[in-house]
Image (spheres, rainbow, N blue to C red):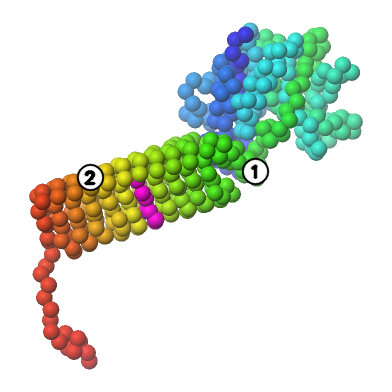
C-alpha cells in the first residue's frame, strides 16, 4: 500500500492558553508543540504530512519544508477540519488523523496504529484507551460483536446516558482510515449535536451503516494521548517529554547526575560517557561529544562541544569548543567564540566572535572580543581587547606563543606578533613586532611625604 497520509489538526484558537501565541506554537522542550506531532508522523513513515490551520494562517512560516497546509475557514469541529484537508488525501492510501495539541504521541504509536489498521479488514481503526477516570473524554460504544459502533461525546450534560458515562474506554482522537471510505463519509456528516459541529467520530456509525468494519486499537500508555489545553497541561506534558529525553540519553551512555534539576531540549545530542552535572541546561541545536563534564550550573545553547571538554559554572551560547578545551568556572562564551584543541577560557572570562588557538589560555578576568589568537599563547589576567571605538568594531590579531602580562589593554585594530610580550599595565595602541616586548605606561614616580601633607 502507499505510505499513509498523516493529517494533524491544529486550527484551534487555544483560548485557554491566555496567549497571543497560537497554542500549538508554544515551545515544548525546545520545539514548538506542533513539531512534536510532525516529527512523530515523519518518523512513522508518513508519505505526506498535512497540518490543518485556522483562517488566520497562524502557522505560516512555522512548519518544516515539505509539510502541506490546509485551511479550516470556520471552527466547525474535527470532522470539518479533516474535510478541509480532503484535497490532500489519497483515496487509495491510509489516512492517520492526530491532534496537534497531543505532542507526546510517538512514531512507534502511529506506526503501530497504521499496522493494525492495514492488517485488518476494517475501513476505520480508532486508538482507544481505558481510564480509571474517563471524565471529559468521548466514550467508545461497542456492539455485541465487540466492534466499535460509535463514540458518544460528553462535553455537555445530556450528551450521554448514565450507562454510556460508565464506560471506561475512551476516544483518544487518533484514527486510521481507508482514504476513500473517509472521504465518502466526510461528505455525509451532519451537525446533529448541541454545538452544531461536525465531529470526526461521527463518521464511524456512517461506515457501520454501510456494512463496513470499524475496529479499535487499544493504547496501553495513556501519556501519549495527553492533550494540552492550558499552561498547566503544558507544564505536565513538558515534564513527561523531558523525562523521555533524559532516559533516551541515559540509555545511550550519558550520566545525568540529577535529572530533576537538569534541562535538555529535544535538539541536543550528547556522546557516551559524558556527565551532565546538576542544574545544567542544554538548549537548542547543541551537540556535545564524548567524555565531557558539563556543569554544575552550566547553560549551553546552540553550541558545538568536542570530546573531553570540561565546563563547570559557565554560560555558553553559539560557540564552538574543540576536543580537550576547558571552560570556566564562571566563563561567558558568546556567539562566535571558537576554542581550538586544548584551549582554555578560565574564571570570569568573556569571549565573543573570537578564535582561540590550540593550547592557548585565557585564564581569568579577561574580555576577548573580535580577536584572533594563535597557538600556545597565554593572555594574562585582565587582558582586554578594546574592540569598539563608539562607532565601529575592530579586530585584534594576537600571534602564536604570545605572553601578555596582567592588565594589558589591546586597542583595536592592533596586531601582536608571534613570540611577543607585553608589560603589565600596558595600553597597546600600536602593533607589537614578533619577539618584541610592548610597554605602554607612564614611568613610576614616588612623592615622598605625601601622606603627611594630606593629613589635616
Residue span colored magenta: 325-331
Foreground residue, 221 or 311? 311
Q: x, y percentage for residue 287?
A: 43, 37
Q: Whole-Å distance between the Cαs marked 2 and 1?
A: 49 Å
Foreground residue, 135 or 85? 135
| Between discs 2 and 1, the one toward the N terminus | 1
| Residue at the image point whose x is 64% and y is 16% from the top | 95
Q: Which residue is under mark 1?
A: 236
Query: Relative to residue 261, is residue 44 depicted above or below?
Result: above
Q: x, y percentage for residue 326?
A: 36, 49
Q: Is residue 193 visible?
A: yes
Does residue 440 belong to the magenta stretch? no
Q: x, y percentage for residue 190?
A: 75, 18
| Residue at the image point whose x is 12% and y is 72% from the top | 444
Query: Relative to residue 33, is residue 409 depicted above or below?
Result: below
Occupied quadrant, residue 84: top right
Query: Relative to residue 92, is residue 377 depicted above or below?
Result: below
Foreground residue, 54 or 6? 6
Occupied quadrant, residue 3: top right
Q: Which residue is under mark 2?
A: 375
Query: Relative to residue 184, is residue 356 depicted above or below?
Result: below
| Residue at the image point whose x is 18% and y is 46% from the top | 400
Q: Is residue 394 visible?
A: no
Amino acid at each position: 500500500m502507499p505510505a499513509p497520509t498523516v493529517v494533524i489538526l491544529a486550527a484551534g484558537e487555544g483560548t485557554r492558553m491566555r496567549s497571543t501565541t497560537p497554542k500549538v506554537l508554544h515551545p515544548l522542550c525546545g520545539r514548538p508543540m506542533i513539531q512534536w506531532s510532525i516529527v512523530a508522523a515523519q518518523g512513522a513513515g508518513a508519505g505526506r504530512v498535512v497540518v490543518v490551520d485556522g483562517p488566520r494562517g497562524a502557522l505560516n512560516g512555522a512548519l518544516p519544508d515539505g509539510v502541506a497546509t490546509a485551511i479550516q475557514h470556520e471552527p466547525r469541529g474535527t470532522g470539518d477540519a479533516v474535510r478541509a484537508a480532503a484535497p490532500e488525501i489519497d483515496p487509495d492510501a491510509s489516512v492517520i488523523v492526530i491532534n496537534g495539541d497531543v505532542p507526546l504521541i510517538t512514531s512507534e504509536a502511529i506506526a503501530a496504529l497504521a499496522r493494525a489498521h492495514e492488517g485488518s479488514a476494517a475501513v476505520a481503526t480508532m486508538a482507544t484507551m481505558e481510564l480509571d477516570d474517563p471524565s471529559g473524554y468521548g466514550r467508545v460504544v461497542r456492539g455485541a460483536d465487540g466492534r466499535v459502533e460509535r463514540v458518544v461525546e460528553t462535553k455537555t450534560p445530556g450528551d450521554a446516558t448514565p450507562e454510556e458515562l460508565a464506560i471506561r474506554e475512551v476516544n483518544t482522537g487518533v484514527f486510521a482510515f481507508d482514504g476513500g471510505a473517509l472521504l465518502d463519509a466526510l461528505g455525509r456528516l451532519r451537525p446533529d449535536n448541541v454545538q452544531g459541529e461536525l465531529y470526526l467520530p461521527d463518521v464511524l456509525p456512517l461506515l457501520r451503516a454501510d456494512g463496513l468494519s470499524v475496529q479499535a486499537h487499544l493504547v496501553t500508555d495513556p501519556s501519549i494521548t495527553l492533550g494540552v489545553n492550558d499552561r498547566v497541561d503544558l507544564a505536565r506534558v513538558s515534564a513527561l517529554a523531558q523525562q523521555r529525553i533524559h532516559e533516551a540519553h541515559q540509555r545511550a551512555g550519558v550520566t545525568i547526575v540529577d535529572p530533576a534539576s537538569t534541562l535538555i531540549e529535544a535538539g541536543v545530542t550528547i556522546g557516551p560517557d559524558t556527565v551532565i552535572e546538576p542544574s545544567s541546561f542544554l538548549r537548542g541545536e547543541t551537540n556535545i561529544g564524548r567524555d565531557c563534564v558539563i556543569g554544575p550550573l552550566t547553560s549551553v545553547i546552540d553550541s558545538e562541544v568536542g570530546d573531553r571538554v570540561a565546563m563547570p559554572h559557565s554560560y555558553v551560547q553559539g560557540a564552538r569548543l574543540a576536543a580537550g578545551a576547558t571552560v570556566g568556572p564562571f566563563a561567558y562564551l558568546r556567539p562566535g567564540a571558537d576554542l581550538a584543541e586544548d584551549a582554555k577560557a578560565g574564571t570570569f572570562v568573556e569571549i565573543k566572535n573570537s578564535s582561540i588557538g590550540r593550547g592557548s589560555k585565557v585564564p581569568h578576568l579577561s574580555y576577548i572580543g573580535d580577536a584572533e589568537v594563535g597557538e600556545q599563547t597565554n593572555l594574562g589576567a585582565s587582558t582586554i581587547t578594546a574592540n569598539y571605538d563608539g562607532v565601529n568594531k575592530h579586530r585584534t590579531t594576537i600571534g602564536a606563543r604570545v605572553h601578555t602580562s596582567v592588565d594589558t589593554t589591546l586597542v583595536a585594530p592592533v596586531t601582536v606578533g608571534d613570540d611577543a610580550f607585553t608589560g603589565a599595565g600596558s595600553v597597546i595602541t600600536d602593533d607589537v613586532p614578533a619577539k618584541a616586548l610592548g610597554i605602554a605606561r607612564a614611568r613610576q614616580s614616588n612623592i615622598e611625604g605625601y601622606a603627611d601633607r594630606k593629613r589635616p
